[in-house]
Amino acid sequence: MSILKKRKIAEDSAEYEENSALELSAEEEARLKHAKKLKRRRTMRFWDRVAGFIIVTVLVVGCSCLGLEYVIVKGPSPALGELFINTMYETRRFRFIPQLFLTADEVAEIRSTEEIDKSTQSDTSLIHIPTEEEVTEDGVDAYGLADEDGDGIIFKEVKGNGYMGYMTVILDPTRVFVGMPDNYGGVGLTLEQMVQKYEALGGINAGGFKDDGGGGFGGLPEGLTIIDGTCYNPDMGMGHPIAGLDKDGVLHVGYYTYDDCIATNIVNAVSFGPILISNGEPAPPETLASSVNPRTAIGQRGDGAIIMLVIDGRQVHSIGATYQDMVDILLDHGAVNAINMDGGSSTVMHYGGVYVNSCSADNGQPRPLPNAFLFK
């Protein structure tokens, strides 16, 4: 065979092998594409199943919760139903739940309480603020609380059935005052910002605020508001009870008009409620709605000491307290007059440079406030 013919055969053979290799590469590429498609389909099916499981679980849990809520609302225990409805109604984001099972009239009937006597005002003769000569030096007061470091401030934890909170007792009531944001009616300040603004030692949230748009800016107080002798809305009054401190540090609790405040020398006042204790008498249970939520209250003992009380709520470590729980705690610690302040996610106490309680806001951050009770 000639050299040229051999070369021709070799070239033809090489061309055949090259074409075969190209054909094999195309087949492999097709197989790879097919494998990738199968993998994507398997991945999609997996996540579809996960999503389906989550959706079904949410539906089952949701239906179970709705069923449980229906049983509680419509069940055989009216007291449990009333507690549940009032608790949900006081929580803005869950207020719709009772309305799923009850008409507006039924909700209003359940939430109704007996009227209290709005003419009652604080009897200042029940408060005797001791002079320096009358103050004992053993560090333990008549209620078993010890001012261990002698700074006139007593701080303690409060625990009860299903709730946990904190109490601050300020022995000298003239150290207590009301703080406000920089601009009345604008954007509120957090409690920590108010403490820093006034260089205070601590305090609690105080009155409620108007929040028609739901923005939670907290700058416009609701009800009569007097700060450092200046009344910012004298036309309001009698709509809400007030917590007012006069020039001598006596806490006035009741339904006061602006003229009443002038007549009693009240220089700091905020509005909220309900009244918990008036002139040594606890509020009748029938005047207090039953619900479990975060709570804030302020009161005064017979010796003039101011009691600031907060109870955590809507959390694992503390579900919350009822108004009656607050009454019982305050009576146990000698309160002669006491009133509930804004609660829920507004409930905060600041002392020693930190928030001492756990805020129940969705993001865990204390909200802007229209005012606060602070102490120097």
Image (cartoon, grey):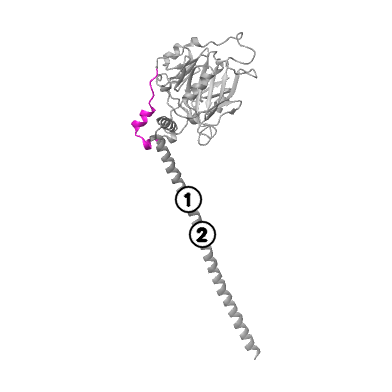
Q: Residue furthest bottom?
A: 1
Nearer-the-camera pick, 210 or 357: 357
Determine contact: label 1, label 2, CB under 8 Å: no
Which stretch appears magenta? 98-116
In the image: residue 226, left or right of residue 157? left
Judging from the image, what secondary structure is the residue with disc 1 in? helix
Q: Quickly name the residue at label 2.
A: 42
Residue on which disc 1 sits: 53
Q: Residue at x 35, y 28 (%)?
A: 109
- The residue nearer to you, when weighing 242 against 11, is 242
Classify the position of the N terminus by image quarter: bottom right
For residue 305, above or below residue 218: above
Which dot, 1 or 2, sits closer to the camera? 1
- Quadrant assignment for the C terminus: top right
Question: Residue 84 appears at what percent x and percent y?
Answer: 43, 32
**Helix, strand or loop for disc 2:** helix
Give the main secondary structure, helix, strand or loop, of the magenta stretch. Answer: helix
Report the front residue among 7 and 355. Answer: 355
In depth, the one of 342 and 233 nearer the eye is 342
Give the alpha-carbon distance from disc 1 to disc 2, as whole Å: 16 Å
Q: Position of residue 189 (x, y in %)?
A: 52, 28
